[in-house]
Image (cartoon, rainbow, N blue to C red):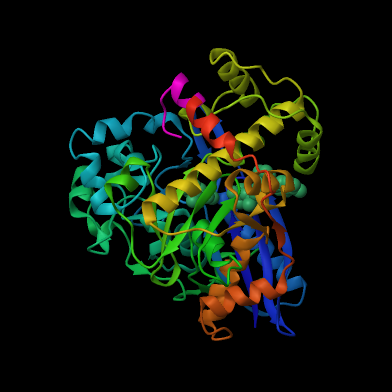
Amino acid sequence: MTHIAVDIGASSGRLVIGDIKNGKLTIEEIHRFANGFTERNGTYYWDIDHLLTEIVKGLAYAKTLGVKRCTLGIDTWATDYVLVDQEGKRVQEVIAYRDKRTERTIEKITKHISKKDIYEKTGIQFLSFNTLYQLYEEKKENLEKTKMIMTVPDYLGYKLTGCAVTEVTSASCTQLLNVKEKDFDQDLLQLLSIEREQFPPFSYPGDMLGYVRNEYFPDYDLPETKVIIVGSHDTASAVAGVPAAEKNWAYLSSGTWSLIGIESDTPIITEKSLFYNYTNEWGVFGTYRFLKNIMGMWIIQEVRRHLTKDYNFAQMVDEARKAPPCKQFINFNDQRFFNPDNMVEEIQKYCRETLQPVPQSTGEIARCVFTNLAILYSLSIDEIESISGRTIDSLYIVGGGSQNDFINEMTAAVSRKTVFAGPSEATAVGNILIQLIAEKKLANLQEGRNLVLNSFSIKRFDPRESGNEALKEQFKQAVFSWICTEY
Ligand code: ADP
Ligand code: LRH
């Protein structure tokens, strides 16, 4: 039996075949496609039909490679949703989380229910685009036509198999789940005028969803495909794929977003975690991901999009290395970097407004982005240690961003932690591990993580004797003296 991971992030999607051969986990990417949102009349949309078609194309390609039977797991980014009517049809286009409609919704909702109450119920970080806020802004007539509200991976699974579930790792990012009651929170649902029954029954990583209904896709020759529920939230799968074998580790899932945190058996919900805006996303097999969302590689993706010359990411890292040391402190978590018209100009404007040297060349801009992200990561590690009372010895960076040696070195230097980097496809790897556990080829997650450690080359970055850790203090002073935003 072959195992295939479908992993769709905000910037790209892929189908990856994975299995255990000679005691090693092997993975092979068989299909890759671009993802992104587009603007129409002032609203930002994902092309969900395109994503479904790409999954089916990838499966058909697997068949041409000789795959007759396979299992399939689907993970995507979180917080966006699809409304489905009585006939199983989409009620609306899928609005992207970077849309502007929820810019002020946290303020509106917290007039009815306090931030503290929402946090104590859900344990989830306040992000303007959580599903709670998106559904608050949804047109009432759309919600009235809605039989089922689904996250993106659940919807894709539904379109393939006809089976509807609410997978818990993705569902927790709606900020609608009550972490004590382990169900949707009635007060929050009431605020949205949504019934519990509008969400399909819960399902957990390792469960079976159903078989792909090949008759739904008559134009394609597809293998017999059993869909297994994985960590449907890509970050849940990424953290499952972290090759950590020791204690005291933290992770950084580095893609469009940077998700930095620790795995915990229990949620950590305290005044301090609320103050620093940390989240407790539900992980695979009853774990919690205590973490912070940091703006991440989105910044460099957007810089790249606005450069006149066409650089790939590796070239941007090279340019950063050649540039002089970064002279700017920038809080990339500031809302102004969430979706500006032009990221290069926004960075330059920020520097002008804060009376800092304005980066001009590609290398200067890239170096400034990577350095400030490394500082944010290091500050987060301090916060995590302080909130959780745990000591962190090492940071495992996984995802596409783990290929950036410059930022890995910088993070080791500023945080003074040992950094391990790779695999860059940890999300697909974590997705495959859950399928292997479901198929009884692996006993548990730790066995899976040991397998990843023994199968991929993981780079190590040790902190230098004289690190750059003073940058953290300089950053804090600079950022707080200019504009007091949360970093
Ligand atoms: P997501 O799944 O969230 O869309 P990925 O995990 O695919 O994101 O990571 C994409 C990011 O990985 C890019 O934005 C880029 O910053 C980084 N990246 C990809 N390839 C390289 C490379 N060769 N060198 C450095 N960084 C890279
Ligand atoms: C990363 C991610 C992250 C969410 C964001 C919307 O891809 O799933 O965990 O907060 O996208």
Left or right: where does residue 115 sit relative to residue 259?
left
Which image quadrant is residue 307 in?
A: top right
Residue 12 makes an appearance in the image: no
Is 426 located above or below residue 463 in the figure?
below
Q: Nearer the viewer, residue 130 or 243?
A: 243
Which image quadrant is residue 197 in?
A: bottom left
Is 280 located above or below residue 441 in the figure?
above
The N terminus: image quadrant: bottom right
Q: Which of 88 and 211 is in front in this view?
A: 211
Left or right: where does residue 432 sit relative to residue 483?
right
Spot occupied by residue 260 in the image (x, y as percentages of width and height): 51, 51
Residue at x 62% of width, y 64% of height = 428
Spot occupied by residue 184 in the image (x, y as percentages of width and height): 26, 58
Left or right: where does residue 78 sit relative to residue 431?
left
Q: Magenta stretch containing residue 480, yes or no?
A: yes
Spot occupied by residue 147 in the image (x, y as percentages of width and height): 31, 55
Residue at x 24% of width, y 51% of height = 120
Is 473 located above or below residue 9 in the figure?
above
Where are the magenta residues, as a range? 478-487
Is 116 located above or below residue 434 in the figure?
above
Instruction: Point out the residue furthest to the front here.
Output: 465
Q: Nearer the viewer, residue 181 or 98?
A: 181
Residue 275 makes an appearance in the image: yes
Q: Magenta stretch containing residue 374, yes or no?
A: no
Spot occupied by residue 356 in the image (x, y as percentages of width and height): 61, 17
Q: How many labels does the image show?
A: 0
